[in-house]
């Protein structure tokens, strides 16, 4: 299903960007908007061709690894993607670590202590994490952690190749902002999965054999509840690659989010197309990874294959 999905996505990406208001040629031509200059730019970027022809040419270039050239910076889009993608991947990875470290243990504890004060408290905390907007939490953390406490830098980004310590310090707050919301989602799904497994016959049998409660929960219940958790985690990571726009803007992180926002405002179609297409490929790869992890985690699926 990967190939037809990518073809459909490419058609949507190319077609919908044509609906964006404005004309990038007007911005490139400058204030004078010389007719000869505009005609040259139209010919250079093949904007005079019919839309199906433009799509065919674009798709042929994409297949060969050529995403076109940014009309704003005159830099190949592939170079821009390779510059910005590692930054967003690192931020997404940090945020997922935060979400997993908070959400999965909280979901397990909530399921084990169902109906208690602990369970209700964790659910309230998870709902709060889901309800608080990322931009508000980011601004609040900058005000408290950076301005008042002066513990972490308020914005900016440093490459790990330049200064690993400073890189980690600049990533902590954005990762916490993104990770807390995801932790609430993971907690609720982990709790639901664990509640279903804890009522299973094999869990009751394990307890009847006298196994330690921790062993029953970790080795028997959690392992069988991991499939929906893996599905959600991989999809959330895919969303982070495209959905960290506000957080990257607030903390001035030069990642995918800032790149696509700037491209939309400047009508830089080639960059918009390249970023969205790479994001779609990322979602597909995350789904493939989830399928592979299913087989590794669940022995029954290995037997079926």
Image (cartoon, helix red, strand yellow):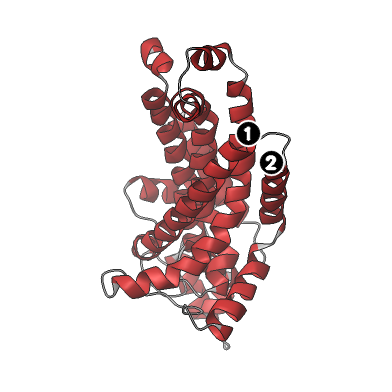
Asked whether 67 or 49 is in front, the reply is: 67
Question: Which is more toward the observer, 154 or 287?
Answer: 154
Disc 1 to disc 2, C-alpha distance? 7 Å
Residue 70, percent from left and from top? 43, 68
Vertical side of 271 occupied by 9: above or below: above
Toward the bottom, the furthest residue is 32
The residue that mark 2 highlights is 119
Give the residue displayed 53% in from the left and 50% down from the top. Answer: 102
Task: Write down the quadrant of residue 117 in the picture.
Answer: top right
Q: Are marks 1 and 2 in contact (CB under 8 Å)?
A: yes
Which residue appears at 54% of the width and 56% of the height? 179
Specify which label sits upstream in the sequence, 1 or 2: 1
Q: Residues within 10 Å of mark 1 (few under 14, many from 20)?
A: many
Q: Quadrant of residue 119?
A: top right
Residue 163: image x %, image y %? 29, 75
Residue 149 vs 18, above or below: the answer is below
Q: Which residue is mark 1?
A: 111
């Amino acid at each position: 299903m990967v190939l037809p999905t990518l073809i459909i996505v490419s058609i949507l990406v190319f077609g919908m960007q044509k609906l964006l208001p404005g004309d990038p040629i007007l911005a490139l031509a400058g204030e004078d908007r010389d007719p000869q200059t505009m005609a040259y730019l139209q010919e250079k970027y093949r904007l005079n061709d019919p839309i199906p022809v433009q799509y065919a040419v674009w798709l042929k270039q994409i297949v060969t690894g050529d995403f076109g050239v940014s009309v704003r910076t005159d830099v190949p889009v592939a170079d821009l993607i390779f510059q910005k993608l590692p930054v967003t991947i690192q931020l997404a990875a940090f945020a997922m670590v935060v979400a997993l470290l908070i959400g999965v243990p909280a979901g397990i504890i909530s399921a084990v202590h169902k109906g208690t004060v602990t369970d209700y408290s964790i659910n309230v905390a998870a709902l709060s994490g889901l309800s608080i907007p990322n931009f508000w939490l980011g601004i609040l953390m900058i005000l408290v952690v950076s301005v008042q406490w002066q513990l972490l830098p308020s914005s900016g980004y440093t490459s790990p190749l330049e200064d690993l310590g400073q890189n980690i310090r600049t990533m902590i707050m954005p990762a916490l902002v993104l990770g807390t919301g995801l932790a609430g989602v993971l907690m609720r799904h982990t709790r639901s999965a664990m509640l279903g497994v804890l009522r299973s016959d094999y869990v009751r049998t394990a307890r009847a054999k006298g196994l330690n409660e921790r062993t029953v929960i970790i080795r028997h219940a959690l392992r069988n509840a991991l499939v929906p958790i893996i599905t959600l985690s991989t999809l959330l990571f895919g969303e982070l690659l495209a959905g960290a726009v506000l957080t990257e803007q607030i903390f001035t992180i030069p990642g995918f989010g800032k790149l696509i926002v700037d491209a939309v405002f400047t009508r830089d179609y080639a960059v918009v197309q390249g970023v969205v297409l790479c994001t779609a490929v990322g979602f597909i790869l995350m789904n493939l990874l989830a399928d592979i992890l299913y087989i590794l985690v669940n022995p029954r699926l290995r037997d079926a294959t």
